[in-house]
Image (cartoon, helix red, strand yellow):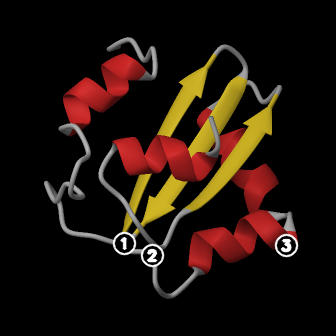
Amino acid sequence: RTPFQRMRLAGYTKGVSENCAKGYTDPFAALMGWTRSSGHHRNMIMKGHRQMASAMSGDVWTQNYGVGKVGEVAEGAAPQRDARERLGATPR
């Protein structure tokens, strides 16, 4: 899935950005990698973003950014818990 498709399932319809990093050993190292990359850093400081989620799967770290209210679900989108289940996410 694309970042937009994944975030749409979570209820976001606009203001979508994603950062991915592979091979970092801890969250701080991934964060430092993103801050040193102009494109990833722009996602992190973009004015319009109001919410951020971060996750790790294997050796891939992600950050997703969106606009919306906590608990807001886009029309036709499943609630967040169901969206995570459809994406194959497992609770930690």
**Does residue 5 sit above or below 40 in this rendering?**
above
Left or right for 63, reference 82: right
Is residue 48 or residue 21 the one in the foreground?
A: 48
Q: Are marks 2 and 3 in contact (CB under 8 Å)?
A: no
Mark 2 and mark 3: span between their CA atoms?
17 Å
Where does the C terminus fall, quadrant-wise?
A: top left
Residue at which label 3 appears: 38
Dot label at residue 67: 1
Q: Are marks 1 and 2 in contact (CB under 8 Å)?
A: yes
- Residue lying farthest to the bottom in this orientation: 47
Q: Are marks 3 and 1 in contact (CB under 8 Å)?
A: no
Residue at which label 2 appears: 49
Dot placed on the residue nearer the N-terminal end, 2 or 3: 3
Is residue 17 or residue 54 the one in the foreground?
A: 17
**Does residue 20 sit above or below 64 in this rendering?**
above
Disc 3 versus disc 1: nearer the observer: 1
Image-quadrant location for residue 71 = bottom left
Which residue is at 42% across, 17% downward? 89
